[in-house]
Amino acid sequence: MTVTRRLSAPFGSQLDRKQTFEFEFEGKILTAIAGDSIASALAANGHWILSRSFKYHRPRGVLSMAGQDANTLVRVNGLPNCLADCTLVGPGMVVHGQNYSGGLRRDRMALLGWLSRFLPVAFYYRAFYWPRNAWNIWYRLFRKVTGLGAIDPAHVAPRHDKQYQFCDVAVIGAGRSGMQKALAEAARGRQVLLLDENNLMGGSLRYTRASVDAAAELRTLEELIDAVSREVHIDVMTSAVVNGLYTDRWLSAVKGRRMLKIRAGQVALCTGALEQHALFHNNDLPGVMLGSASQRLIKFFGVRPGQRAVVLAGNDQAYGVVLDMLDAGIDVAMVVDMRQHVSSEERCIAVRQAGVEILTGHAVFAAQGHDHIKSVEIRELNADGKCHGPTRSVDCDLLAVSVGVMPAWQLACQAGAELVYEDNNAAFSIRGLPEGVEVAGSAAGVPSGMNHPWPIVAHPKGKEFVDFDEDLQIADIINAVNEGYEHVQLVKRYSTCGMGPSQGRHSALATARLVASETGRTVAETGVTTARPPFAPESLAHLAGRSFYPERHTAMHQRHLQAGAEMLPAGTWYRPARYGTDTDTVALEASHVRKGVGMIDVSTLGGIEVRGPDAVEFLERIYTWVFRKLPIGQSRYALMTNEAGVVIDDGVACRLAENEFYVTATTGGVDNVFRKMLQWNAQWALDVDLANVTSAWAAVNVAGPLAREVLQAAGTDVALDSDAFPFMAVRIGQLAGIPVRVIRVGFVGELGYEIHVPAHYGEALWDALMEHGAPMGIAAFGVEAQRLLRLEKGHVIVGQDTDAMTTPAELQMSWAVGKKKPFFVGQRSLQILNERPDGRVLAGFMIGDTAAPMPKECHLVFANGEPVGRVTSSAFSPALDCVIGLAYLPAADSAPGAQFTIHCDGGQQVQARVAALPFYDPAGERQKS
Amino acid sequence: MPLSLLKYGFSDRFPAKFQFTPTKNLKKHYDVVIIGAGGHGAAIAFYLAKYHGITDIALLDRSYLGGGNTARNTAVIRSNYLTPEGVRFYRESVRLFHELSNELNYNVMLEERGQLTLACTDAAIRSFRWRAEMNQHLGVRSELVDRQMVRELVPSLRMAENGRYPVLGGLWHADGATARHDAVVWGYAREACARGVELHQLTEVQGIDIQNGVAKGVRTNRGDISCGCVVQAVAGMSSVVAEMAGIRLPIHSYPLQAMVTQPYKPMLDPLVSSPQLHVYVQQTSRGEFVIGGGSDPYPLYSTRSTLEMKETLSAAILELFPFLAQAKVLRQWAGITDMTPDYSPIMGLSPVENYYLDAGWGTWGFKATPICGKTMAQLVATGTVPDLIQPFELERFYRFEQVNEAGATAASH
């Protein structure tokens, strides 16, 4: 069997006939030749059915043989929706058809085809919703049968990556015009990247028959390839599918397991043309294919697409197809030419001379056969393009259709151009390309004579498929229009025409023609089609590339791990949550700080340098408080609001010099703070320099009554006694031989020093503090202990204790808002908001009942059955020996001592009492000691 | 085989009935002019016609019916918002969605498959608890679930125990649903037109006629119209159209992108989103995976799509469902979202008399379609602002009374 279908060289240019191997299709072992696509190997073995269609489960086979249709979607080695006409067969490959029940040849679901008269266009909108909620049952049934291939949930994708490329000119398509364009640009000394989706250059020169003299065409091809290969300015990249042409000539292409991202100075689209199908009864039957598909099978793969062929012609190109068929020894029973007269072009004359019967003014009315074409029915065309008269039946096992082409418009339209159709001569052109993008060759336009204006033959029984992906027939399009969906976009959306895997490649033109005809407009007025990226379906593996979700580690990260810390994500950073897993770990860590000394890695705190003559002015505008009179060597709390007066970040601003500030920000907020700063200063244009130095600095907070002794022991040139280095002061000096910036802060409410060092000293600092602090019993504490300690002190965490509406007044932090400043971001809003009487307040609370469940953050506060507030922080305080927390309450009900109810998990109600803040050391003596 | 389909099958000729207004000239005057024939505009027209007897309505669109954000959104319906005002409003919308197919005699394919929003940080757990508590109080099915429950709801999800974004829990919203977005606008428009509303497509409003602070008519590319009142329902163009009426809206417009894969056999029922990874996904009943995320980072009025957003979404979705690496993207697109400072819409009266606003729909417009149509129609017909939309009036910004939904939107549409 195989022998008769295979053609010998020179046919089969893709094949390496020395190598053959076996593969599996639908459980059968078949033989392929190296270089075969799945579809060609199957064709050589006499298998034409590749898949079952989406809706009616009709058998489908080769249509374009160029990866441009959904007929060839198969399952390859477990992966769904692979194009059988583009995927090369490999040894041992396992291939299955898709979307069938029972067998590919005997699909039980094909019954749906018989029901098609009951399933008119958009049938699902008309039914299935009665009685109420009936769709809830129906959709579950639909979900059992829809979709094409099945996703393999166990699949692990091999590694995919990305590469950036740059070139003066990117030429897409290495056919005749692409190669010519590349040579011309290279001759001007420009660096050219020539891309083609096929594995060999040549484009249509390799498979079409533009003239009788095939040898002359082959010479042209070889000369061009030779010239391109010798040109040093041209980089050739084959097997690369260009999928996207984005703004500013930004291209994406897929090659192998790599995605290329190419910035081109100029783009030339030489993407060629896409052959179009004709509409007649059973135009989807296996054995019916585009003329170019039969040529590809013959020339690329040396496979005879049939033994006895009929060719449906609408242009001269069809006669090139006939000549190729004759060369391949195929019996061409008849050429059915839809034109009234055959042109005097040499290919037509050659076909006539070869004695092939040519029937002009006729069309294929229907293809007949069960799961492969057996015969065609031919009728005469009348003046208005309709079939009439008696039917003539011709036996054949191949019907090749060459009635028209469209420019491969997708990339041009992605770039914003428009595909223009001229109704009087069925010609195409591309209009409105952006600067730096041009089109050449067939992609630039299809001239008059290439397209038959109406290759559409309606049949009383329908099944003339406009869109193969969605199984849409002529009547579906017409009915959509007649139901009022007249705009071509509405037709598409209503009928789902063009929404399938081939994205309207073969249906857009026919649809536009049918809509135009039905609405009495021209095709040009109707509009043919648009395009959105990508050109060809691209896998998520390609798009994602290597997963890149970076983790940021502080300089002391290894020390935390060595100490058995459990790490906690904090924005992009990881921080030690606690050192150990015992239930009392956090309490112990906290108690160390309260009673002795502890240290915590605070390197993740944001750090922003603000320098320049306007540095103070800048801070005055960005932050709510006043900094003009802040002495050098002092720091001050810095609270940031947005235009609406909402608190968005806080930190400490340290004045290091007259015009130099070091400002800290929250771990999660610093990037946004810095962005806002840049944004505002772009408007203000102050003489100030901003730098986000977060990762340049490592920092440790040493806190506790013995903190001073630790620093002393480590050795420092900074005078540490309280008079020389008071609360909120900043000092620059050395500690344990390391250059440091020390800020005396009190976030956890004890005597504390925040020691900032260049990041590469971080680990050395940590080690030095551990070593010299050992006699004082220093111990590291984690974020959880810090949260507890700060809560006892009543300090808020922006983001946890604030929400998208919180104002400074609600936080009882109006003290941090300058009253006499001329301006800061959010000032006007705050002035208005502060006038409002009925606000809310973030208040402290305690729960006396030790048996009560502990409220969690974001449990709601209720009054009279309505939510009136919520808990933002809560914890058991070892220092106070009860549950404490912060909660938003109505201002009127927030006086210390007031009782309120919190609804905990499972609706349990807990009584809490408002407590004055801070809970711990209200006078603040400890942090100032 | 439903009866309604049998009648199509057994009739000789397809009984196509024209569902909208056949092309004809504009009248000189209408009682109501609605700018924008998207889901909202069509819904307003429908409720006015059916429940208020007002049928002298021109429903205008510069392009085709439902061709704006109605066509571009990813069709997520949910009510698990944060503020009581928001939750009540969207809860009512979900209720109306459940009745919609029968109300319109048009299957809008409401599928209540539930929505799961994933938490990868304890901050997310906190905010989900807030939403769940508020939702439950207001009768919305919404609960904070733990890892085990997440695993049961979506067995194919990667929990990433030791990964960059470990799944710690989630917010499970059993009321979460999808519907066929196009069907919603078509159904509304068909029923409105059947009651005498005139749908005019390809009719662009180019100016608003205002006299002494009162809207008197609109100027279009097909002629001028005088009218009793004007309703603007033009998501993505709200500021531009309001500007024609001399109204400045507190809106920044950002592109929002999405993409869709080829159809595969349905395997993922719930809608899954991860605010941390800025991605959400749902598999339609056609089998396509629809994947979306957050808005673009800077304001723009162009609906171009970008490679970068597609790469970001792809990388993010593979963190959740690594096996989707084999799925292939078919199409990507963008819509324009009108973002308000508080992530809530602007509905109701405007500074111009007889000019009504239906604007600021950001990423939450589709899910509000029925309730918005119903309440706006009530407002237009009676002149009284319905309680449900009172909190969303434009004036709230003048008074600093925002309805803050910032915590309930992001990438959890």
Image: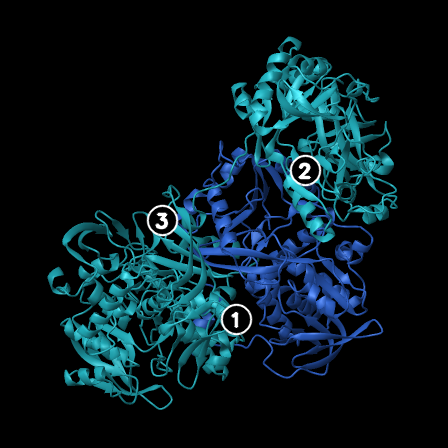
Q: Badge 3: how crowded within 10 Å, few (<14), some, or many (20+)? A: some
**Picture quarter with the N terminus of chain A:** bottom left
* Distance (Cα) linking label 3 and label 1: 37 Å
What chain letter is assigned to the residue under label 3?
A
* Distance (Cα) linking label 3 and label 2: 43 Å
Q: Which residue is mark 3?
A: A257
Q: Amino acid at mark 1?
A: Leu
Per the image, label 1 sits on a secondary structure element best described as: helix
User: Chain A appears what colour?
Assistant: cyan
Per the image, label 2 sits on a secondary structure element best described as: strand
| Left or right relative to A74: residue A517 | right
In the image, farthest residue toward the top: A775
Q: Amino acid at mark 2?
A: Glu
Query: Which one is in front in this view, the residue at disc 3 or the one at disc 2?
Result: 2
What chain letter is assigned to the residue under label 2?
A
Q: Amino acid at mark 3?
A: Arg
| Left or right relative to A351: residue A100 | right
What chain letter is assigned to the residue under label 1?
A
Whole-percent x, y for residue A886 in the image: 76, 31
**Picture quarter with the C terminus of chain A:** top right
Q: Which residue is mark 1?
A: A490
Q: If you read the primary sequence from the N terminus, does the residue marked by circle 1 or circle 2 appear first?
A: 1
Whole-percent x, y for residue B45 in the image: 68, 69
Location of residue B2 with respect to A920 vertically, above or below: below
| Left or right relative to B210: residue A857 | left
Q: Badges 3 and 2: C-beta atoms under 8 Å apart?
A: no
**Nearer to the camera, A595 or A120:** A595
Query: Which one is in front in this view, the residue at disc 3 or the one at disc 1?
Result: 3
Q: Which residue is mark 2?
A: A609
